[in-house]
Image (cartoon, grey):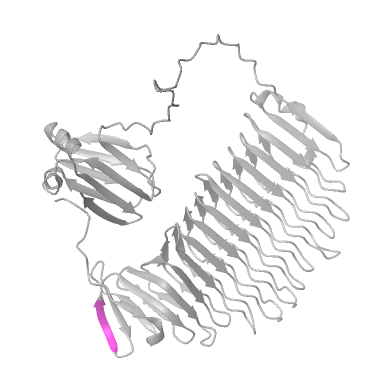
Amino acid sequence: MLTALAAPAFAETWYIENGDITVKASGTEGKNTVSQGNKKDVEDTNTIITGTSNENTVTIDTSKGNVDVTFDDLNIDASSRKEAAMSVTGSGNTTIKLDGDNHLTGGNGSSGIDSIGSLTIYGGENDSLTAKGGSGADGSGGDGIHSGSLTIYGGTVNANGGNCGDGNYSDGGSGIRISSHSLTIYDGTVNAKGGNGGDGNYSDGGSGISSNGSLAISGGTVNATGGKSGGGGSGGDGICSNGGVTISGGSTVTANGGNGGSLVGGDGIRSGGGLTVSDGTVTAKGGNGDSKDGYGGDGIRSGGVVTISGNTVNAAGGYGGKVGGYGICSFDRVAISGGTVEAAGGNGSTGGGSGIYSSVIDLSGSLELTAKAGSPNGKALSQAGHELDLDTIKDKLGPGAKVTVTDADGKVNQVPIPRPVEPEEPVIPEESSSSSDGGSATPSAPASPLPGLTVTDKDGQRISYTSTQSGNTLTVCVGRFTASFRISLAALRQLRAEGIETITFQTILCSTTLSVDELLAMGGEDAEAVLTHRFTDSSLTVG
């Protein structure tokens, strides 16, 4: 059989209450060496760590290669150790598979998870990880998760930055902080909250999510909240990326900036390299700058182009004791070509923020835009410092588009583009859908392109797939992390008669190739073969 399925391998379960655990890459793909107490460099595969401890920690060494480890209801509180609950050294990739409910809390000013390399976290629908940074009694708070790069697939990840002490220049920790590369989130739920700043001068709140590189969110739900500043500092951003931010795949993103002290409220989403929303629901709100000299944070603030082409975006600037924040601010260009967008400037005592502020505002297509100026003196659509003339955009708007602006005094102006009237079509009587015995017909499941072959999602519902044939191999592809390929042995016999010798099933993270002849030898006339992929794992049953 040609298959990616591996035979069951020995996996020892390690209990954190028995002492510190060190997991190293052995240099052989798929194998680790584990040390704990008197056990030194024990060769292990599919390493599992479980248990509860407020004294012991986990260290992972990827200097000789990648390390995979499973956390099974693991609970570590390293407050007494003043270090990270889990530390990763080396430049390799660490993969954490979540099983159950896991908690990692860092010590004073330390991260819950601290990694200098690449970190990948997998979780199922009922799996979770809560990582908390320790409070900085004498300085800045620790990050919930700190890594060189991070990829999250599914599950629920809660990441909270620690609060900082009351010294000057001490900041709250970030919920998630990426120090060198990128952050990518696929599916699942991520809740990230920055720690609060202290009462000292220039003591800022931490960001919910902070990435020194790019940030991509594709599917799932992300809630990111910046910490507040207790005194003479700024609020943390909900999401802050020095690279670009991309939101797609039907994601739901909520990002709130923290309130500032004597300076500025945090931005909801802050991007140094542009923001693109193509398919998702985004709510972004700037934090308030409550002091008499404070500035409200922006809902969305970008050094690059802001591009919105679909779904829903709601961006609001925060209140400023002096000047309110912008709803959407770009120092390059704002281009909106579809979806429903609301952008509201925050109010201030001396100046209100603009709904949208940019050098160029490009509105086109069948968008629905509502822009509101903050009071006093704000602008609804501030292009190069002047209110955009709505008469100049009518020719670029598509059928059904509507642009509504409200100035700082409450005056409303609107540009609606009606949809063309479709000619009425003749009404053709439909045939009765009732069955001959008087019962109502029920909708049938989606038809399979190949008889006897179906693909189902994690809930057992049929989903569409693509199939291609190359030579004597049939390949079935589906864009899911978890899916099951199902085929009757009768259908397999038909495929074999047509010359198909192998079948490859491909999901997003896993590919398995099976021999048709060996499958046929495993079951009877009425049997069914079921191949299930869950992230990178696969399992096969025939019966």
Quadrant of residue 503 in the image? top left
Residue beneath the point at 64% across and 25% down: 398
Q: Quadrant of residue 286?
A: bottom right
Q: Residue furthest top?
A: 426
Left or right: 2 as drawn, with respect to 399:
left
Side of 83 relative to 523 (left or right): right
- For image coordinates 54% across by 41% down, the residue present is 279
- Which residue lies at the image location 76% right of the left edge and 30% below the top edge? 390
Residue 493: x %, y % from top left: 14, 36
> Along the horizontal axis of the image, is 44 left or right of 2?
right
In the image, residue 42 lies in the stretch drawn in magenta: yes
Q: Closer to the camera, 438 or 370?
A: 438
Horizontal and vertical percent position of residue 142: 57, 75
In the image, residue 211 lies at what x, y percent? 54, 61
Count every numbered label the image shows and give the total.
Answer: 0
Residue 6 drawn at (x, y percent): 21, 60
Q: Nearer the viewer, residue 405 or 293?
A: 405
The reply to whether residue 267 is in sight is: yes
Image quadrant where residue 63 sits: bottom left
Q: Residue at x 37, y 75 (%)?
A: 49
Magenta range: 39-43
